Amino acid sequence: MKVKRFFAQTMAEALKQVSEQMGPDAVILSNRRVDGGVEIVTALDYDENMARQRLGNQAEDAANGSRLAEMQADQHRRLEDELSRSRDRIREVREKRASQGASYAGSFAAIQQEVSGGFGDIAPLPQAPREAYSDELAQMRAEISSLKDMMQGRRPQTEPEVSATTAVQQRLAERLQEFGLGSDLAGSISRRHKSGRLEDGWKQSLKMLCTGVRTSRMEWLDEGGAYALVGPTGSGKTTTIGKLAARYVLKHGSDSVALVTTDRYRVAAHEQLFVFGRILNVPVRVVDESHSLDDILDELSDRHLVLIDTAGLTSADKGYQEQLAELARSHHNIKTHLVVSATSQPRIMKSVWHCYKMANLAGCVMTKIDEALTLGESLGFVMETGLPVAYYTDGQKIPEDLHHAEAVPLVRLAVDRLKTLQQQQAVAEGLKEHA
């Protein structure tokens, strides 16, 4: 049963609205004069038995169908007025929250000490007002949802406390999706929050991200060994190898590092790597028909660090299977890492992972962090795949824009990025309103 209220200056205008919006099957429950005109309350699919169930004990006072219809209309008026008041309250709370300049970054203050103590430069913001506003908003959303159910003839399926918790979980899932997480992961994380407080759920979610994002403890430059970077063309493999090599040379010199490329499929594919080699005074070797990867690694066995660049091939390209098999079957302990661009769509990240996981991936490197609007997509990807993050890059400077990955700074960077995006959106909306 659908109930709706109409206002007009005259009865004829009100009836015209009813006809246009409700159709010829609408039943008029009541009509009366109000300030400025008339009011009509109508219903579609009106059922007296259903109306009695909705009114409960009040329906006992209805001696006839006409009185019952009036009582149904009166209940609808009260619910609609309460719904309007709830919306006004939400608007007031939003205005108060906007005046406080609330920011997501403040949520990190509570987990600084719990998760490795790495948030030193984020000043905690006043959180109590925002928590109060968030809780109040969540409760009012639940209130509105319950009122809508009653207006549409449905009984609330949960108790008020459970409804409020569900509303907070829904808002938390929305915030996590704004952060960049996929809907499934955001929903899974938000459902673990049971306290009914939005800010508590946000802090708990950030802590879960900090503990869920795996990173490599040791730096390659210190640990040594053979490392291969795989990934699609344009993901930043060669540039990342140049940054790693430059950092190693600055720290240890050029005598114990070497560069290798397996890309024998594209014309001039080696040019950038050879440029790095000449600048750093580091040898560069090419895998081809005469020199297998294992042969070259045997010759470079005295080198502390060997960095291997690969061709950016897809499963449809010639040589794709050969290149990955060569890495996987090597008798050297090659630690293969997937290079993932933070600007890629989540579906593309997943597709790339499926494409290269046969190479026995040991982890990943996140590139182009500086170009991504949000970083939740990348964090969600590494959480879902379980790949440890070894390094991330956030610019073209060599080697300054290469960073050893740690979970807490990465999540903090993602929150800062979200804050920046929201500020930009707020400015854009403000300019639009004044245009």
Image (tube, rainbow, N blue to C red):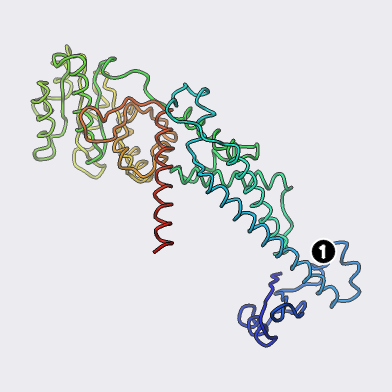
Q: Residue at x 58, y 49 (%)?
A: 96
Residue 24 higher or lower than 201, as above or below = below
Residue 103 higher or lower than 75, as above or below = above
Quadrant the C terminus occupies: bottom left
Left/right of residue 10 with respect to residue 409 in the rendered view: right
Coordinates of residue 344 in the picture (x, y in percent): 33, 44
The residue to which callout 1 is attached is: 53
Left/right of residue 294 with respect to residue 275 in the rendered view: right
Looking at the image, which is closer to me, 382 or 29?
Answer: 29
Dot 1 crowding, Cα within 10 Å, few <14, some 14–19, many 20+: few
Looking at the image, which is closer to me, 322 or 78?
Answer: 78
Coordinates of residue 302 in the picture (x, y in percent): 16, 11
**Label 1: which secondary element:** helix
Quadrant the N terminus occupies: bottom right
Q: Which residue is drawn at 56% across and 40% down?
A: 190
Left/right of residue 56 with respect to residue 365 in the rendered view: right
Coordinates of residue 319 in the picture (x, y in percent): 19, 38
Query: Where on the picture, by quarter, is residue 373?
Result: top left
Query: Where on the picture, by quarter, is residue 51?
Result: bottom right
Query: Where on the picture, by quarter, is residue 194?
Result: top right
Coordinates of residue 269 in the picture (x, y in percent): 12, 37
Residue 38 higher or lower than 209, as above or below = below
User: Residue most toward the bottom?
Assistant: 12
Looking at the image, which is closer to me, 75 or 258?
Answer: 75
Left/right of residue 7 with respect to residue 107 in the rendered view: right
